[in-house]
Every structure is written in structure tokens, then in C-alpha cells.
Image (spheres, rainbow, N blue to C red):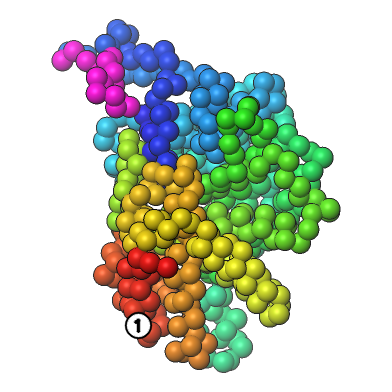
Amino acid sequence: MPRSIPSGYNLQFYDSYVDNLIAKSSSGNFITIKKESTGGPRWTLECASNETLSTISYSINLTKHEQGILNIGDASKIRLNRYIGILGYSIFGYLEPMDKVENFPVMLIVQSLLEWPIHLTLSPSNQQIYGTASGIAKNYYHLADSQIYMGPNMNFTYISISYDKLFPCSSLDQTLIEQNHTQISLSFYVIIYTEDTKNFDIDMVIKLSVQAMKNILLYYNIIPFSFYTVAMEMIKPLDDKHTGGFSIEHLNSCTINVIYGTIINKNSTNNQIKTFQYNIAHHIQHAWLPKRLFSIFYYPFTFELTPVIDTIWFNEGFGQYIAMDAMANALPLNESYEYRQYFIENRFKYYFNLAPLFIKQMPLPYLSMIASSLYSSDFRTGSNLYARGALMAKDMDELIQSKTLKQKSLRDGIIYMVKWSESNSYIIPFTMEQFPEFFMNATNVDVSLVLEKWLQLTHI
């Protein structure tokens, strides 16, 4: 059973909520199951040599599960007669070695009350499905990184987003240019459950989500999926011990956890709306980086323990800078500059300076390893990590634009890296030796000095 959360940089003992674990052979006999004695989230099946394992079943009490997990963003949710929201990795166990096999199809069948709508991020439908839904995951990782939403209080919206994908064309001939683009359609879904309909304008939130996705698509011009879900929950905490606000990215979706009482409606300030939409864009962006562009130890994922990763500054820092860049690029020039400055000053520089001295003095790779299991639970680590990564991205972007007279930017290097990952089926990690080489190939600018400066920075 998982304890580690993909892109969560956190540890949750989901195995604590597994009950009624039963295994049977093909002949219908019960198979003995024993929990690992050293405290790990695994069980051993003692199957006789003349019998074959047929089924494994277990139950999870979602009420107990939600009560026991204090970080709202890490827990599945249940609201009697209203709503259920399930994070795949919080309930789906696995048999070794299926967690490490790239091509291991897994079928998911979900049943609910006949009158309840169901949405699977694994295989969404353009129309609401009631009672039973199903889908096939490429492997266990894809299953675990998917979500299930259902219930009469679930707000479902489907939108087809069309955009022009451009292909390189050196000719200025308009006919040739027109022949070098094609229109692509993305099935886009917004799932919302809110316990505060007064302050949360669902129509406004849907529009903000759609525009965020459009801006990210324009930035990358590479679409590695045909469907995507933004799932949003505004949950009233069960008590004072439960904390919320942390959102998380997935392969084909993101779960946006909105702090209860957040005001997103016509009375919101421009900065409130800007920050809210940026959070959506930031987590949509993660479907490219790091979900499909990552360094070592990120994938294949280690589900039992949090993997120690020394490049979270790239995953989060560059990822957040890219989201800012994509959103700013869609604005008029004067508004674009103001947008960038707002996040550089109020998000990146602010958290860069906020951390205590001992965290500021940690080299970036070391801080990343520390934050591999503490990113959100001790947000001093996570916030300083992404702030430093984003400011490194800013320095690289400015260097590239300066050296190329604004003919190239950080975006060119990132897209080069994504295409490299695409050519490797999005499953091969890059190395830090390759990192400056990618940017040199894409922009003809050496970014190694900027990289070394930020990696080795040990005092402020």
C-alpha cells in the first residue's frame, strides 16, 4: 500500500486504514495473509504450492481515513449523501512488481448509487455517467495517480478546447505557414465541490481554469494527453487540527484544494483572482514538468517511502516560473510586466527572504533532499526551495534573452527538454550533466555559471 505521494514530497500511512483484507485461491479457499513485522506497508500471502491466487479484497473506511489524515490535500473525502472524492494512491494497493512495470494494464470499475454521477480522471466522459464507470490504466502508477469523483453535489463541466499547434517553418510565405499548423482539440473537465457556495462563484472559477489551460497550451505547443481534469474542493476542515490549502498535480489532472472561506467572486480583488488563477495554472503546468520531464529518482516512483530527490528546485521552482511566464505572455505588454513583477516580488523573492538563516545556508541540492519528505509539512523548506528555483529560472531567462537579443528565452530550453523527454516516451530522467547542454543546444547560451551559482549558494 502506498505511503508516498507522487509529487507530494510527503509521507502518509494509508495502510493504517486498510481493513478486512482477504485473499482467495481459484478454488475458493482462503489464503493466509500476514502483515510485515518491521512496520512496512506490505503484507505477505502464504499461498500453497498447489493453489493459485484469484482475488484480493479489502475495505477502507473513508470517514476514519479523512479524520486521521490532518493534511486535507492528502486525504480522500466523503460527505454523506452528497459527495465522494478519492485520490487513487490513498486507496489502491498493488502486488510487487507491478509498481515498477511500465506496461501493466489495470482495469478500474467503479460502482456507486444508480442516481449518482461519476467522473474518472483516468477515462473521463464528455457526458455525466451514472451508477457505474470504468477505465483502463497503462500501469499501476497511472492508476494510483488518478482520481474518482462522485455524488449529487459534484459540479461537472466539460469543455472542448481547440488550439493551433504550430510547426517550425522558416519561410515567410503565408501559404507555407498555414500548411505548418494543425488544430488540436483537448477534452477539458472542471469538477468542483464546495461547501461555501456564497463566496465561491463556480462559473467564474470555470472560466479562470479554462484560460489557465489555454495559456499553458500556448506556452508548450506540445500536448502529451487528450484529456485533462481540474478538480477543485473547498472543504470545511473537520476540526482545528486539519489544515488545507495545498494542491497537487497528477498526470492528467490536478486537485486544487481551496482554503475554506476563500472569496472568489465579483467582490474579489484583482490580486486575489490573479493569485487564485496562478495556482491553477501552476498545477496544470506540472503535467509537463515534472510529470513528463524530470531528473533521477522521480520516476519510476517509490510508493513505500518518499524518494530522496535533489532537484525539487527544478520541479517546483522552474515549474512555477513557467506558469508565471505562460500567464504573463497572454497579456498586453504593460500588463505582462506588472504580472511578472507581482509574482517575482510577492512570491519568489518574498519566500526567498522569509526563511530562517539555517535554511538559507543549505546548498540547493541538500535542501531539496531535506524537503523530499517535508515540503508541505514544514513549508519553510518547500517555499524556500521553489523560490530559489524560480529565481534561478529568472536569472537564466534574463541571460538567454540578453545574449540572443530576445530572440530566445528560457522557454526555448524548456521546450527542447520536453521534446527530448517525449522522444524517450516520457520515462527517462535527465541528468544534471545534460541540463546545461540542453540549453546550449536550444539557445546557444551557456547557463552553467547561473546553475552553479544557485546550486552552491550557501549564504545570503
- For residue 392, what is the image quadrant? bottom left
Q: What is the three-letter code of the residue carrying label 1?
A: Asp
Q: Position of residue 400 (x, y in %)?
A: 45, 83
The relative height of residue 459 versus residue 403 in the rendered view (above or below) is above
**Which region is colored magenta?**
33-49
Q: Which residue position holds label 1? A: 446
Residue under the point 56% across and 58% down: 282
Tell me if I can see residue 212 in this picture.
yes
Q: Seen in the image, is 64 located left or right of residue 204?
A: left
- For residue 43, what is the image quadrant? top left
| Nearer-the-camera pick, 91 or 458 | 458
| SS class, disc 1 | loop
| Nearer-the-camera pick, 272 or 78 | 272
> Is residue 43 part of the magenta span, yes or no?
yes
Assign the N terminus to one quadrant of the image: top left
Residue under the point 32% across and 18% down: 54
Residue under the point 18% across and 13% down: 48
> Is residue 202 part of the magenta span, yes or no?
no
